Amino acid sequence: MTSDFKNLLEELYNLQRLGIKTGLEHTRELLKAVGNPHHKLKFVHVAGTNGKGSTCALLYNILKQAGKKVGLYTSPHLLNFNERIRVNGHTISNEEIVDFMRNNYNHIINIQTTFFETTTVMALDHFSKHNVDIAIIETGLGGRLDSTNVIMPEVSVITSISMDHLDILGESITKIAEEKAGIIKDFIPLILAGQGKYVNSIILEKARIKNSPVTIVHPKNATLIKVDYGGTSFSYDGNKFRVSLSGEHQVLNCMMAIEAAKKVCNNLNYNKINKACCCTKWPGRMERLTNHSIYYDVAHNASGISVILDTVKTIHPEKSIIGLFCLKGDKEIDRIVKAINGHFSQLLITSDERGLLLPVDRLSSLLSNCQLKCTLVSSVADGIIILREKEKKGSAGLIFGSHYIANEIYRAFEISFERGDI
């Protein structure tokens, strides 16, 4: 890492002191200063609470298999900032980050764009310079006032919605759905995950007002064949698919990606789609860390945690599950307690080494109503030692709750993390 890159990346991270701003004005102002690179690009815009990252990764690979030059912007990253911005198998380089920050530093400081606003503009500028055919853009938080909402997409995608980021998006499923629906544009097609009638009714009403044609993708329209540690098999639309992501929930994510791809690509066929699904990797999503039965998933809300617990039990029905858990302070803990109660034979409670998550004693206090055997461990590494011992005795292990512990996990398991393709 060069000193220039290290210093400028630190300057970028320092923008986090400005917090999270809801609104598009600063993003638009910085885009204008950079030359409005987004005006000549085509986009797919993806919002949702759970599944949007996996959906983006699957769509990215489907469109690449179809011969497109594809950009992908996702957040947060697991280990390296560069992961957030990709073009056809290559993350943005350190040199390109340095160039953007140098060329636009005065604009960034004068406009006072936040970290996410700045990285969004960096991504759009990068995609423009690389002349991508289409860019897949994942929202950061919500949709309506998310800085990614400056784009005009070819198709909008809204994945499953549940309670998360309540301090910013609102403390009801209604408010959260309304925020996500903010990405719907006049006359632009919408791919919508079939879910609760109440949530869908809010989004469908917004689509009606916007004259947005809607395709509802419902998991009942697919047939699950098998879930194992290597992925998920299912049939849909007369074809059998295999996705290299484990969990029944990945069926819906894959269906969403397929339907979105149909809206922006004319030369799709089954073989291209299935090849893309088979080769898609998305670290931190039911990621198998050992040759046996320890997994890592970044799930951090009740619905996401319930889904990964179901997946572990499906893969290892005969095993007890030991959990290693940490959490950020903005999560709805009561719902999470309900999701995990009765599903772990032991829950190890920890925190991260950078101090970004709840301290162990604070999280333990919040879990006081949890009817589980809870054990406090001082670090992720110490928790992993316990998980490995329990695995030898026949238990399955699940590490969950945050993106922020990925580095500690991969270091403990001596797993090399490639910055390249997914």
Image: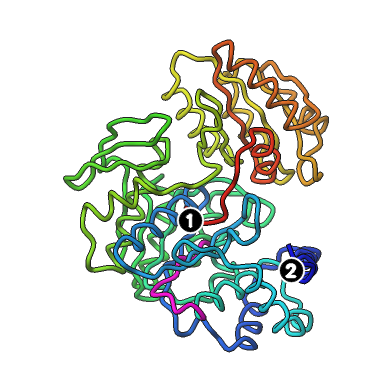
- Of the pair 168 and 12, the residue shown nearer to us: 12
In the rendering, at what x and y percent does residue 77 appear? 62, 54
Given the image, on which type of amino acid does mark 2 rest? Answer: Phe
In the rendering, at what x and y percent does residue 349 appear? 73, 27
Q: Secondary structure at mark 2?
A: helix
Q: Secondary structure at mark 1?
A: loop
In the rendering, at what x and y percent does residue 257 appear? 36, 55
Label 1 CA crowd tier, 10 Å (few <14, some 14–19, many 20+)? some
Q: Earlier in the sequence, mark 1 or mark 2?
A: 2
- Of the pair 162 and 66, the residue shown nearer to us: 66
Residue span colored magenta? 129-138
Q: Which mark is residue 55?
A: none
In the rendering, at what x and y percent does residue 34 appear? 62, 86
Given the image, on which type of amino acid does mark 1 rest? Answer: Asp
Indicate left or right for 344 with 132 as reference.
Answer: right
Q: Residue sitting at 29 percent across and 64 percent down?
A: 66
Indicate left or right for 408 with 62 as reference.
Answer: right
Q: Residue sitting at 31 percent across and 69 percent down?
A: 264
Q: Residue sitting at 61 percent across and 74 percent down?
A: 122
Q: Which residue is mark 2?
A: 5
Indicate left or right for 45 with 112 as reference.
Answer: left
